Image: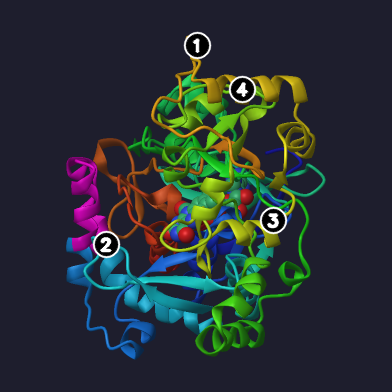
Amino acid sequence: MAGASRIETDVIVVGGGGAALAAASGARDAGAEVILLEKHTQLGGSTAWSVGSVTATQTPHQRKAGIVDNPQDHLEDLRKFSAALKLEHRDNFDLGRVLCDHSPAMFEWLLSTGLEFTGPYPEPPHRKPRMHNVLPNSRAFPYLLGRHCRTHGVAIHLNTAAQRLIMDNGRARGVVATAPGGAHREYIARRGVVLAAGDYSGGRELKARFSSELVAEVDAINVTNTGDGIRMGMDTGGTVINGDYIRGPILRFVPPMHTTFEQRLPPLPALTKLLHWGMDHLPERMLRPVLMNFLTTALAPEKSLYEDGAILVDRDGLRFGDERDQPARTAALRPDGLAWMIFDSTVAEKYLQWPHFISTAPSVAYAYLDDYRHSRPDIFHCAHNFAALADSMRLPRAAFETTIADYNAGSASADVPARRERPAIAKPPFYALGPAKAYIIFTNGGLKVTSNLEVVGKQERPIPGLYAAGANGQSGMLLEGHGHHLGWAFVSGRIAGQQAARSGG
Ligand SMILES: Cc1cc2nc3c(=O)[nH]c(=O)nc-3n(C[C@H](O)[C@H](O)[C@H](O)COP(=O)(O)OP(=O)(O)OC[C@H]3O[C@@H](n4cnc5c(N)ncnc54)[C@H](O)[C@@H]3O)c2cc1C
């Protein structure tokens, strides 16, 4: 390319999330010189937005809890998740085996970088507790894995977006990227290229192509994931499996706008070890507010709230559908996809303790109404009358009061069903949580890869020098249950990086 500068190395990794950092580290361990390209100004991707659950067996945490477990049982239980959804036929258990077999070593590697986890937590149909949650939140992944990569000699180029692959005689030789300032740069890979640029939850075109126009219009939690790695793989003959299998639209409370003091603390091992000690030794009531202040991700309200009498209104103060029937799909069509959840004291009093929680939440496991009251004052509203509640939410008073009056009177319209057996919103004080927003959480379509993470091209042949990891190399795996997406990002990243480093030139 005329005027483009040129940089040469052994392995190029595209992306800066969990899979990319694992790939860069894996390639470096295998003796390669590595450059990692991240288009954002900071590392993290969806990995840093996640709840931070990683599911693995034979971990020190399981051993400490006296749990005897193994990868074969993990694989059998992974199957049960797809079977429960009647989707076993669409899942890829050959790669599922790779995930389960490598999870123990992957988890040890995460610990070796200084990451700290709580758990293991149970999650049926897993027969044993296997879910581990990172401390203090998922931003610890890019922070500590990025530090690990840098100390081991990986060159990290931020603000550098890979645009297309450089191919030579059917072999991946590198990528053309836009460097900071907009200049094009050629990154030549002597050994291999790893695509680890995340999913297409923020990519309108691919969402429309694989799913629907409705889904294409719904915002992603992580808007930087536009499916660039998947597109680059497809441009060279790769195919996408399960492109329509998308998590969302789902209603989640908007993430905190301002960072707390706790969130600004670097997640250094000294801090996370202290938190871990606190979780083992301090009373829960002392620790909950501290842990909730570390929360950075968007939490989802439980469906049971609607059964118990909560309703949803939009920015205009209007109900917009049956809250118990895919509310996120209808919310996605409302102004900005925003909705507020309204309920009275009867519901509020129920959601103060187990087993009635508002959301599952990292570190504290379950967030109750008082957790929102103390830790999310930006989305917690409480008032003694509906006019004051509308003011607190900044919704139009008159429309909101009419909505509640109609609901309580049992009225219905073409789009909005009557409340029937659900209780009226009658007992003050009245509560609202919101805004919540309809989001695409992640997409599951990934390039078809071999068990060595080579991208499979035309005539079912691996494309020499080209590897894909994490969401880019999901290859039909459904990864149902918590903690398998991150597990796959780290497992596949490590393997892809090592394979790329060993790839012939
Ligand atoms: C709210 C939320 C909660 C979740 N919770 C969990 C959980 O608890 N457990 C679990 O297992 N999974 C969870 N997931 C899913 C999990 O986070 C992802 O599947 C996983 O992080 C994917 O890792 P990745 O490395 O493939 O992609 P990412 O972490 O998304 O990284 C991709 C990176 O590539 C960069 N990039 C994109 N295009 C380019 C380009 N052209 N050039 C250079 N860089 C580029 C992006 O900016 C991004 O940094 C959650 C996801 C979300 C959104």
From the image, state whether disc 1 or disc 4 is nearer to you: 4
Q: Residue at x 76, y 25 (%)?
A: 397
Q: Position of residue 331 (x, y in %)?
A: 55, 28
**Residue 297 appears in the rendering:** yes
Are the residues flagged by discs 1 and 4 in contact, CB closer than 8 Å? no
Mark sitting on residue 376: 3
N-terminal of the pair, mark 1 or mark 2, is 2
Alpha carbon of mark 1 to alpha carbon of mark 3: how far? 34 Å
Figure check: 441 above or below 451: above
| Label 1, ligand 1: CB separation under 8 Å | no
Q: How was this image coloured?
A: rainbow
Q: Residue at x 66, y 81 (%)?
A: 268
Element under label 2? loop
From the image, state whether disc 1 or disc 2 is nearer to you: 1
Q: Position of residue 114 (x, y in %)?
A: 56, 83
User: Principal SS element in the magenta part?
Assistant: helix
Alpha carbon of mark 1 to alpha carbon of mark 4: how far? 14 Å
Mark sitting on residue 405: 4
N-terminal of the pair, mark 2 or mark 4, is 2
- Identity of the amino acid at label 4? Ala
Q: Position of residue 153 (x, y in %)?
A: 63, 76
Instruction: Report whether 500 appears left or right of 477.
Output: right
N-terminal of the pair, mark 2 or mark 3, is 2
Element under label 4? helix
Front residue (pair 228, 97)? 97
Q: Residues within 10 Å of mark 4 (few under 14, many from 20)?
A: some
- Identity of the amino acid at label 3? Arg
Q: Which residues are magenta?
A: 77-97
Q: Residues within 10 Å of mark 2 (few under 14, many from 20)?
A: few
